[in-house]
Structures are given as structure tokens and as C-alpha cells.
Image (cartoon, helix red, strand yellow):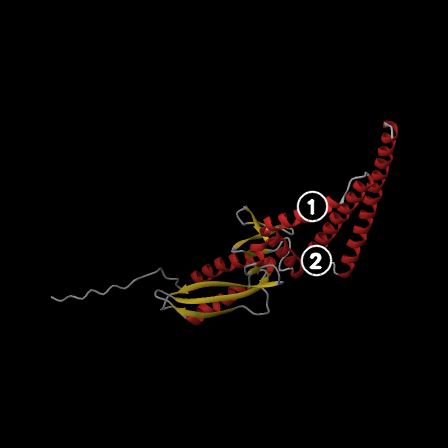
Amino acid sequence: MDIRETIIRYAVNAFFALGVLVIGGLVVKILTGLLRKAITRVDGRHALVVRFVVSAAEKTGWAFVIVMALAKLGVDVAPIIAGLGVTGFVVGFACQESLASLAAGLMIAINEPFKVGDYVVVAGLEGSITALDMMAVTLSTPDNRKITIPNKSAWGQPIVNFSALDKRRVDIAVGIAYGADIALAKKTAVETVSAIAGVLPDPAPMAEVKSLDDSAVALTVRAWAKTSDYWSVYFAAIQGVKEAFDREGVAIPFPQLDVHVVSKA
């Protein structure tokens, strides 16, 4: 076989290999699109699962297309396939932590304990979720710090989601003097909190004695608000109760200590 025939043969093989890549790429694109629609139709809530499954299917499809294209070029793909198996085992062993986060990410995607925009406590860290993928959760803290938490850590500890339910209870604690009128203090606190914008009428606000502390009678004042109104109600309640107690003459004492001196003279 002369060099001309060799060049022609390789050119033909390259043409068919290119055709396999083009046609295979179109097939992968079409099939992954159909897969995305099928999964979304079954359960459109788990967007993270959809992205993961479609991405995995797309990468697998492209790997198959590339192997076919190499075969058209005359490359012996058997060693490549065997090598991919060995490489996959080695990489999987070396990336156990990443695989653990990936598995945890799949659990998060399926169970959906939170979503982007929720205010949460995850792995002992508090903030709003700004990004969520199969490997990590990204939080933005109230003081504008960005925190990235591996899914393995996020799923392995208790998760508190402050945004999951439509309303929250607002609790404030206030101490009154032992000589103060407790009934008046409770009535004033309830009336004050009830008048705050955003406080829900049901369940109705309440105030009760929580404990008898060293320097004060501790009251707990409770009201309910929409989750989105929580902080505005919380701050307004603290200020409102303090100002109302001042008007009604309900004393809020400073910490104090009684010292008794015994003379042995």
C-alpha cells in the first residue's frame, strides 16, 4: 500500500470519525433533552436531581461517542475501555470525600430540606442559601460573608430551616421589678404587641411569667408573624414593650445584689 492510499484511508476514517462525533453529539443532545423533560414531568420539584441525572447521562453519552469515533480512526479501544475501568477505580478511591459529598448532595436533592433563598442553620453555620449544587451548599451570612459547606457536612448534621413554614413565633424576654404589678405588665405587653403591624391575630399574642430571677420577674412575651415579617416584628416588639412599660410605670430593674453585713462586735 503506497502512501497515497494510506492518506486516503486515513482521510476517509477521519471523515467517518467526524461524522460519528457530529451525529453522536446531536443524538446525545436530543436524548438528554428528552430525558430532562421526562424527569421534570414526573417530578419537577427536584431541579437539582434533574440537573445531576441529565449531566451524568450527557457525559456518559459523550464518552460512548468519543470511543466510537476513535474506533473509526482505527484505534484499538479495548485497552482504553479497560484503562478507564482501572482509572475509575483509582480515582474513586482517591476521591472518597468528594464522592461522599456527591452522595449527600443527591440526598439533599431528593429530600429538599432547603432551597436557594432559605435562611438556615447548616453544619452549625447560619445564613441565606445563595447557591446549591451536588457538591456543596453556599451561604451568605447576615454580615455578608460567603461560606461554602461540603454537602457531606451539610447532610451529616441537624438542619434548621427558618423559611420552610409560612409563619414563625416571635419570643421576647423582659424582666420587671419584684414590686411591679405583674397583671398590668402582662396586659400592657399583650396590648402593645397586638398593635404592631405584622403581628397575626391567631394565635393571639400572650405574656406569662417565665421565672423568678435574682433581680427581676422574667416575663416571656410571644406573638406570631409571617416568616417574612419576623425581624421587623421582633425589633418593634422589643422597643414597643420598653416604651409601654415606661408609660405605665412598670419598672425594669438593673441587676442588683443585696449584701448583708453582720457585725460581731
Residue 12 to residue 226: above or below:
above
Q: Which mark is residue 113?
A: none
Quadrant containing the C terminus is bottom left
Amino acid on which the number 1 mark rests in the picture: Gly
Residue placed most toward the observer, 86 or 38: 86
Do we see residue 249 in this rendering? no
What's the distance in space between the residues labelled 2 and 1, CA to CA?
A: 35 Å
Q: Residue at x 87, y 28 (%)?
A: 2
Residue 46: mark in rendering = 2
Q: Earlier in the sequence, mark 2 or mark 1?
A: 2
Residue at label 1?
A: 83
| Residue density around tag 1, few if under 14, some if 14–19, many if 20 or more, within 10 Å | few
Tell whether 137 sits left or right of 71. Answer: left
Nearest to the observer: residue 80 or residue 139: 80
Task: Indicate the amino acid at tag 2.
Answer: His
Q: Residue furthest left?
A: 265
Is 128 located above or below residue 190 in the figure? above
Q: Position of residue 210 (x, y in %)?
A: 44, 69
Element under disc 2: loop
Snapshot quadrant of residue 256: bottom left
Q: Nearer the viewer, residue 24 or 117?
A: 24
Say few, some or many: other residues with alpha carbon within 10 Å of mark 2 (under 14 / 14 to 19 / 20 or more). some
Count of marks placed on residues? 2
Tell me which corner region of the image, top left, top right, bottom left or bottom right, holds residue 219.
bottom left
Whether residue 201 is situated above or below residue 102 in the rendered picture: below
Q: Can residue 70 be seen in this snapshot?
A: yes
- Where residue 259 sits, quadrant-wise, is bottom left
Residue 116: % across, % down? 64, 53
Towards the viewer: 159 or 218: 159
Assess whether mark 1 and mark 2 are in contact (beta carbons under 8 angstroms). Answer: no
Q: Position of residue 33 (x, y in %)?
A: 80, 51
Q: Residue at x 74, y 49 (%)?
A: 60
